Image: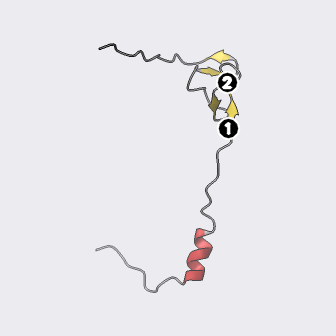
Amino acid sequence: MAPLPKRRWSTARQGKKRASFVLVKPNLCRCPNCGEVKLPHTVCPRCGFYKGKKVINIKVKTKKNK
């Protein structure tokens, strides 16, 4: 069996702990090559460019005709 706490945390102490858990909206920027929204300092997931250079090749999905 796992160890259990000896005393219950008060709601004030619990609130102080949870006050530091903040959700932050990520900063987004536009890719200068394709204009897609992406995270800064990362490779663009749509075109594969980073700092004006092609870094990775992106596979283009094609639709299958039935």
Give the mark nearer the N terminus: 1 vs 2: 1
Measured as percent of width and height from the top left, residue 24 is found at 64, 52
- Taking the spot 33% from the left edge, 13% from the top edge, the residue there is 65
Residue type beneath disc 2: Gly
Residue lying farthest top? 65
Amino acid found under the numbered disc labelled 1: Leu
Identify whether 10 is placed above or below 48: below
Q: Which mark is residue 58?
A: none
Element under disc 2: loop
Left or right, 45 with respect to 4, comes to: right
Residue depicted at x 62% and y 60%:
22
User: Which residue has dot 1 on it?
Assistant: 28
Placement of the N terminus among the 4 image quadrants: bottom left
Camera-nearest residue between 58 and 17: 58
Q: Image height check: is 29 above or below 64?
A: below
The location of residue 4, given as percent across then percent down, is 38, 79
Q: Residue at x 64, y 35 (%)?
A: 39
- Where residue 17 sits, quadrant-wise, is bottom right
Q: From the viewer's perspective, is the residue at label 1 or at label 2 nearer?
A: 2
The span from disc 1 to disc 2 (Cα, nearest Å) is 12 Å
| Vertical comparison of 48 with 15: above or below | above
Instruction: Tell me the crowding category of disc 1: few under 14, some 14 to 19, or many 20 or more residues within 10 angstroms, Cα based.
Output: few
What residue do we see at 59% from left, 62% from top? 21
Q: Please determine whether, in this image, residue 57 is positioned above or below residue 23.
A: above
Task: Write down the residue under mark 2.
Answer: 35
Residue 49 image-quadrant placement: top right
Q: Secondary structure at mark 1?
A: loop
Dot 2 surroundings within 10 Å: few (below 14), some, or many (20 or more)? few
Q: For the view shown, which residue lies furthest in the bottom direction? A: 7
